[in-house]
Image (cartoon, grey):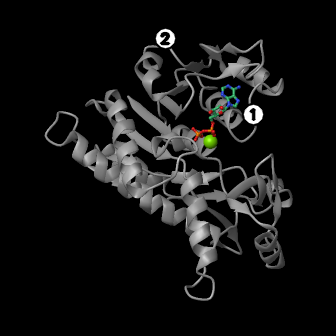
Amino acid sequence: MRAVAALGGNAFAARGSALTMEGQFRYARDALRQLGPLFEPGVDLLLTHGNGPQVGHELVRVERAQGEAYTLPLDVCVAETQGELGYVLCRTLRDLFEGDRRARPVASLVTQVEVDPGDPAFAAPTKPVGPVLDEAQAAALQARGVVVREDAGRGLRRVVPSPEPLRVVETDVIRALLGLGVAVVAAGGGGVPVARVGGALQGVEAVVDKDLTAALLADALQADLLLILTDVPCACTDYRTPREQPLGPITAGRARELLRQGHFAPGSMAPKVEACARFAARPGRRAAICDLPHLAGALRGEAGTVITAS
Ligand code: ADP
Ligand code: MG
């Protein structure tokens, strides 16, 4: 069995709570312990993770250090968070399963994801990144060509394009590591976005959705299972309305229909359902959206939103 599991931001902190390094290790330990079933012998495991809050803090460090430390473009900030969270996950994993039948080598990989420089997303940035800005900070960033916009109810934030992932550059390396029995942490934050310009890959100012990259990787690695682990037990139709209904097992076709009807919020649940519908379009594959306490149930097909071809 080969599984790709994508951990949401809640694996590193409770929603809205302050990030600390100590807290991230603590949350990661708790999350990884709940992933226990995926570490059983006979399961190849690729772990990926979000990085929204961490990259936000990295951008704050970059801004505050202007003039004193060299600046870091967004692709490098993503790479830095892959390093940070790869370290958190690998150190925690090693420690957690040491001497256990689930002990196995672990490695985290700085991972690039190729996007099309002509992707329409570049003409219409939509993804808020970094902290809420005051007027002066917003003006200073705009003077440097950065796009700033009102983020629904929160305030002014920088927005960047969120292009489609085309290819994970290190797919072959990941496949080889999985074949050696290594648990791999890769494509954190959706991958470091790069685009082919004049024959060479270059970093781009963009953020790729981690759930879409997870689906792409799961497909390329011919995984059997794509697990999207977040902070809700399942996807719902008519979310946060009096008609709200939890979604149990559905087909990829039905998932697409519900996507078209607008049941899932863009930027949060919609890319998860889209990722699952893409991956599970092929027979024999299973995708699931759930929270960590429902993982075991989702693996048995009794909890979470489970998406299959038919
Ligand atoms: P993650 O860090 O796991 O990617 P996100 O915030 O991106 O987390 O996505 C999970 C959130 O999606 C949930 O906390 C929930 O509030 C929200 N959400 C939006 N639409 C729906 C829906 N239709 N059903 C369930 N949750 C939804
Ligand atoms: Mg998300």
Q: Is mark 2 within 8 Å of ligand 1?
A: no
Q: Looking at the image, which is closer to me, 31 or 150?
A: 150
Q: Are marks 1 and 2 in contact (CB under 8 Å)?
A: no
Q: Amino acid at mark 2?
A: Glu
Q: Which residue is mark 1?
A: 265
Which quadrant of the frame does ligand 1 lie within? top right
Give the image quarter of residue 26: top left
**Image quarter for residue 263?**
top right
Q: Residue 302, labelled with which disc?
A: 2
Report whether the residue tagged 1 is closer than 8 Å to ligand 1.
yes
For the residue carrying disc 1, how many other residues have a C-alpha within 10 Å: few (<14), some (14-19), or many (20+)? few
**Quadrant that contains the C terminus:** top right
Rendered position, 205 above or below 258: below
Circle nearer the N terminus (1, 2): 1
Q: Which mark is residue 70?
A: none
Mark 1 residue element: loop
State the image coordinates of residue 230 (x, y, percent, origin top left). 54, 33
Circle 2 Cα neighbour tier, 10 Å, few/some/many (<14 / 14–19 / ≥20)? some
**Which percent across, then down, holds residue 186?**
46, 51
Between label 1 and label 2, give the one nearer the viewer.
1
Does any portion of residue 180 appear in the rendered image? no
Residue at the image point whose x is 62% and y is 88% from the top: 67
157 relative position to 229: left or right: right
Image quarter of the N terminus: top left
Q: Where residue 32 appears, x then y in whole percent? A: 36, 38
Give me the residue at 66% from left, 51% from top. 166
Q: Amino acid at mark 1?
A: Ala
Residue 298: x %, y % from top left: 47, 19
The quadrant where residue 56 appears? bottom right
